[in-house]
Amino acid sequence: MSEYRQHAAPADARQRRNAKPIICYSVDQLPSYDHQFYQRARSQLTKVDEVIVPPRDAASFSVPAGHFFRITSIEGSQVGDLNLFNVHNLQEHFYSGKTRQLHASHLTVGDRLWSNLPSLRAIATITQDTLDWYGWDQDGAGVHDVIGTRCDPYTNQLLKQTDYHYCCHSNLTRALAEHLNVATSEIEPLIHDVLNVFMCTGFSKDTHQYFMKASPVRPGDYLEFFAEIDLLGVLSACPGGNCGSSHSDDNTPCFPLKVEIFKTTDENLARWSNSEISKYSGSHGL
């Protein structure tokens, strides 16, 4: 609440505040999470690729539709910032805001990652989460959030008046530019708000400010996804390390992250198909 509030509460303030909360989106019509399908598919996996993301840097990886990919902590407590793109059309990418509205502020098994408008379709589904035990802690924090954006050099310059080039935004920009062999200036506008993998976050109870705290992730923990379309992923190993003290500097111990790509059997995918783009006509009333 702002310290500059100037207006007294009206006589019916309590009545107004006691209005019943309504969940904004009724999600009963969303495709249900087919637990048996995903578990059967992941029971017969063959590893086909692996990428190591260096500390305070980022790396790209490709995941064909119908494959699984797993982000794993391997040396120390470390969070990661994830961008996902349709490999055939980079204009279609992960939409954290709509994902948050359709699921929750923090994601886990059964939640899907949705793409931006006008496609608006599930591009990945979370199938395993070794931190699902964490739930909500005494501070109201949880893991794997879609409420933060990504640490970036512009905000760092605004708040600290210094240039720091290894913020997650810059890491993701460099990695995508290198993957596509283009200039960073050309590709930077495609970098988007992230899934904060392993990050432990919430809003303070008094000022309602976004906060971070030390991640509960430990080596061996992982978050696993199923690719609903052909994906290009870019993952940054955040300069904040486990985000228990600071970020956007070199003061915090940081560790690499591992991305593994797995193929299931063709039999397991016999009745599966890529998710479809929105059926909205696109006329916008004209």
Image: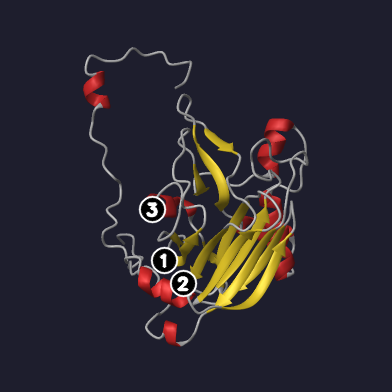
Return the disc, 3 or 1, that comes first in the chain's sequence.
3
Quadrant (top left, top right, bottom left, bottom right) of the C terminus: bottom left
Q: Answer above or below: position of 8 versus 43.
A: above
Check the image and report above or below for 275 versus 59. below
Disc 2 to disc 1, C-alpha distance: 9 Å
Q: Is residue 150 visible?
A: yes
**8 is higher (above) or lower (below) than 179:** above
Amino acid type, mark 2: Glu
24 sits to left or right of 254: left
Say which residue label 3 marks: 103
The image quarter in which residue 52 lies: bottom right
Mark 3–mark 1 Cα distance, whole angstroms, equals 14 Å
Q: Secondary structure at mark 3?
A: loop
Which quadrant holds residue 40?
Answer: bottom left
**Image point (66%, 48%), residue name:** 77
Please provide percent x and percent y for residue 214: 61, 40
Q: Quick one: label 1, few (<14), some, or many (20+) residues within 10 Å?
A: many
Residue 20 or residue 217, whichever sits in front: 217
Q: Amino acid at mark 3?
A: His
* Residue 207 locus on image (x, y percent): 48, 25
Amino acid at circle 1: Arg
Residue 267, given in percent of the width and then of the height, sits at 43, 87
Q: In this figure, which residue is indicated by the disc labeled 2?
A: 228
Q: Are marks 2 and 1 in contact (CB under 8 Å)?
A: yes
Q: Is residue 86 visible?
A: no
Q: Residue at x 60, y 65 (%)?
A: 233
Q: Secondary structure at mark 2?
A: loop
Rendering coords of residue 228 (x, y %): 46, 72
User: Callout 2: few (<14), some (14-19), or many (20+) C-alpha neighbours within 10 Å?
Assistant: many
Dot 3: within a 10 Å radius of its alpha carbon, few (fewer than 14), some, or many (20 or more) residues? Answer: some
Q: Is residue 145 left or right of residue 77?
A: left
The residue pinned by badge 1 equals 121
